[in-house]
Image (cartoon, rainbow, N blue to C red):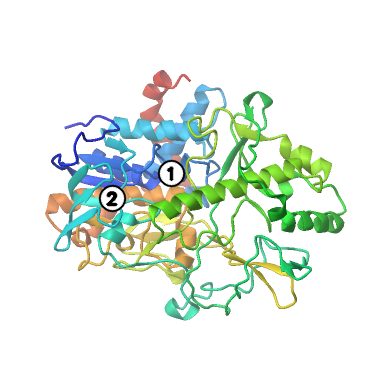
Amino acid sequence: MRYFYVSWRPTTASAAPAAYDLVVYGATAGGVTTAVSGARSGLTVALLEPGAHVGGMASGGLQRTDVGRREVIGGMALELYVRAGLHYETMRMLHEVAWMMEAHVAERLFEDMLREAGVAVFKKHRLREKTGVKKEGARVAEIMMENGAQFRAKVFADASYEGDLMAQAGVSYTWGREGIDQFGESLAGVRTDTPLHQFVVKIPARVNGELLPEISPRPMGKHGSADKAVQAYNYRMVLSSDPANQVPFPKPRQYDAKRYELLARLIQALEVRTKRPLVVNDFFGIGPIPNKKADFNNSGAFSTDYIGKSWDYPEASYKRRAEIWEEHKEYTKGLFWFLTHDPRVPEVLRKDVASWGLSKDEFVDNEHWPHQLYVREARRMIGEYVMSQKDIQTERTKPDAIGMGSYNSDSHNVQRVVLADGSVFNEGDVQVAVQPYQIPYRMITPKRAEATNLLVPVCFSATHVAYSTLRMEPQYMIIGQAAGVAAKMAIEGGVAVQAIDAAKLTATLVGQDAILEYKADVQGRITGKLRSKLSPPRRRAQQF
């Protein structure tokens, strides 16, 4: 049975619950692949999205993909990038696999995959706050939306960045940073050694005894100690260098140049230190994507990361989260406005930043602003197995492997504080290389006593250190594919998601072109297979 791809609202709050085999909450990239994987396995699937778009960060600004070792990416994750390559090939850009793509192209490809699989998609369906989950024993029986819609399923998957369904289901979770001793992780907790994205020149944190804006008065904390602090979020800006496709940087509603005083002093100090004109690349990580656009990311000591302003997000109310999104937006608007208008910014730098603008053809229903805040980390489940530093460094193989990761441990700064000498310091950034490692199925299953029919492919069970490498969009998609297959196996076998045959799951995923071994030649074979499968219909359909 196939379902229409729709955005639906019930006419009355008392309507009977819609029933599916699998209901996925959150149309992140991981949510899309969970839903498509389940549907391709023969399940009836509904995908519920609180917002108006699918793809999460993969179509919401993070367009220069954090791939790590490309050879470990297979299955449906690789399929997305092959589809993108075929799209750009029709535009005579000749990419076999397009790891970098425009935001609107990514969303269109996700929509294609959902529609082709027959997934029922319900946008603007947000879980009712606090009272949205009904359980029967250890099973999630039904979930209720704010708009009155109700959904029943044999298996549920929480693929949101926040983990609200998981939390309401009574599943154990945490957030923030573990201490060094909890899991024996040398990279855990407060990091007094934070060499990257750091102030390379000493800048006094106070002027005339007053703390400069965007610096915390809180003490940093002891090295390696645990806290409930959360790494910085930001907007990944998709900007255009083509004047014909630009929208000028907007001015914030309540712009105050004084909040960027620290940046002004940093610019002055860097000019003295470098003895050259500063340019846009000195303050942003610029990742080129097709059609004269780029993905602008945080880089350096003062950039798009709104450091220290994400701490209460994981447990915040919907209202407070909306405020946090808006605060990040206003901060980022002010940053670009300051760099393009303030007379303290050298003319060369002002002109270089001003040569970019918002992309006119991106995020057209949101004033050309990304529709997704980069929630790098929020809640993390405490499930059947908690991945930690050893699993990404020394104990890298797993008996229940469902995919692989390879991106370096990547945590952004957590706080901006004052050192004992009075200078400003960014704390929390971790950038440590890893070797390719296997991802275990147990990481996405709750403790059996807490929920037997729930899978968590995004807010999965990992420490802050392990999550920092696993949190990449390709890995979310890899894990999502496994979640869809696992749901099918649990339903077919009439067992808890924790009780499925892990060896059979692994074998099924390998048959679906998942990559579980780091071998350079495997991906090329899969890529050729996918191109052969997708090329004829894509060449007829993708003429845009």
Relative to 454, 278 lies left or right: right
| Residue 366 disc label | none
Image-quadrant location for residue 505: bottom left
Instruction: Please tell me whether residue 425 is drawn above or below residue 286 in the rendered image.
Output: below
Amino acid bearing label 1: Gly
Tags 2 and 1 touching, CB below 8 Å: no
On screen, 462 above or below 326? below
* Of callouts 2 and 1, the N-terminal one: 1
Q: What residue is shown with label 2?
A: 128
Residue linked to disc 1: 56
Q: Secondary structure at mark 2?
A: loop
Q: Is residue 374 visible?
A: no
Residue 122: x percent and y percent? 29, 37
Q: CA distance from mark 2 to mark 1?
A: 20 Å
Residue at image location 50% in from the left, 22% down from the top: 90
- Please, what is the three-letter code of the amino acid marked with disc 2? Arg
